Image: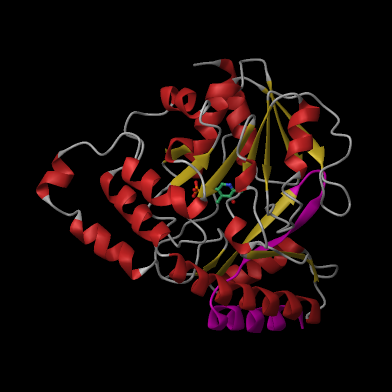
Amino acid sequence: MRPNILKMAGYVPGEQPRDGEYLKLNTNENPYPPSPRVFEAIQKNLTSDRLRKYPEPLGDSFREAAAPILGVAPEQILIGNGSDDILTIVTRAIVPEGGVLASLTPSYILYKSLAEIQGAHFLTVPFTADWKIPSPWPLQAHLVCVPNPNSPSGTFFDPTEVLRLAQESGGYVVLDEAYADFAPTNGLHLAQGKIIVSRTLSKSYSLAGIRFGFAVADRELVPQFIKVKDSYNCDVLSLAAATAAIRDQAYLAEIKAKLIRTRERLYNALLELGLSAIPSQANFVWCRSSGLPNQVIYQKLKERKILVRYMNYPDFGDGLRITVGTDSEIDSLLKALREILS
Ligand SMILES: *Cc1c(COP(=O)(O)O)cnc(C)c1O
């Protein structure tokens, strides 16, 4: 066993209880069903031939369908078994053992595990008080991973800031756009040179169970990443589902508009309850209490079968990250919070 593996704690995913037991507002899943086209596409692929044979290694049908929608070339797209797979592939390809993977803080905690597995140093830089990238960027890194919108804060910075980040850090940058579909703009057009944009179908497309993500990168980089990935990292059914989902942009626009309306309602209601909350550009809202401890609120919600994410960062403190559900789900949450806080 490599010493770095023995030493590391390992990434702990959010709680995933059995279906139906809890109202799940803890891991940013979409409360709305996937596009009806997704079900048709999966059904169509449930044939002996499709299941018997290996899937497309590079996911060419997905790449060809997605490229014109994203405004990039098919050769710029790398498919992944969820965007966590994309982050793994990029880290393995870029960060040497003993090298540096950096991130902002507080942010997505998987980046740390990826650095530890790689035997690399993990360094963090705090966001500025208004949730921007510090200027100048203070350290050199082989790779900097930065989500935009950020988790857990839901905050958003001007994506063109990553151009400066790549220059000042001297390395590659992953712009992790897991939540970009809920934000006003995105950085897809920046996916050139040393900037890699990562996307997932887990959140905005309601397909967390399918495991599909992708990267958009410079066409010179993609062949290097392909050497690192598993030959068949995405299966027949997830490729079919993802291709159908990304083609249905009208459906995406519809559920996105609903979620954004509910997000604003949730944010205002949290303030009315006396909690402090951060305005969000994602499908969740970060809040904290100045009275009852956040962890107690989390526990009391759990007793009422409502799961939110309790998080505690050494350099930022603790709070609750609440996923935007349907309007009636958020009504149930707010009713429970009112009881707990009164
Ligand atoms: C959810 C999330 C991911 C991972 O998404 P999957 O495609 O489900 O692996 C990546 N980055 C951030 C910031 C996320 O919140």
Q: Give residue 276's quadrant in the image.
A: bottom right
Which residue does the image show at 42% across and 28% down from the upper left? 229
Which residue does the image show at 56% across and 60% down from the upper left? 28
Q: Nearer the viewer, residue 84 or 316?
A: 84
Q: Nearer the viewer, residue 73 or 181?
A: 73
78 is higher (above) or lower (below) than 26 = above
Which residue does the image show at 62% across and 71% down from the upper left? 301
Rendering coords of residue 137 (x, y %):
84, 33
Q: Is residue 94 left or right of residue 222?
A: right
Rendering coords of residue 199 (x, y %):
53, 48
Q: Nearer the viewer, residue 221 or 16?
A: 221
Rendering coords of residue 144 (x, y %):
69, 33
250 is higher (above) or lower (below) than 244 = below
Q: Is residue 174 magenta?
A: no
Rendering coords of residue 195 (x, y %):
64, 35
Q: Is residue 324 magenta?
A: yes
Tell me which colouring the rendered structure shows. Answer: secondary structure
Q: Is residue 81 visible?
A: yes
Q: Is residue 12 visible?
A: no
Query: Quadrant location of the C terminus?
Result: bottom right
Q: Is residue 118 left or right of residue 19?
A: right
Total numbered circles: 0
Q: Give residue 5's quadrant in the image.
A: top right
Q: Which residues are magenta?
A: 313-342
Q: Is residue 165 left or right of residue 243?
A: right
Which residue does the image show at 55% across and 70% down from the upper left? 256
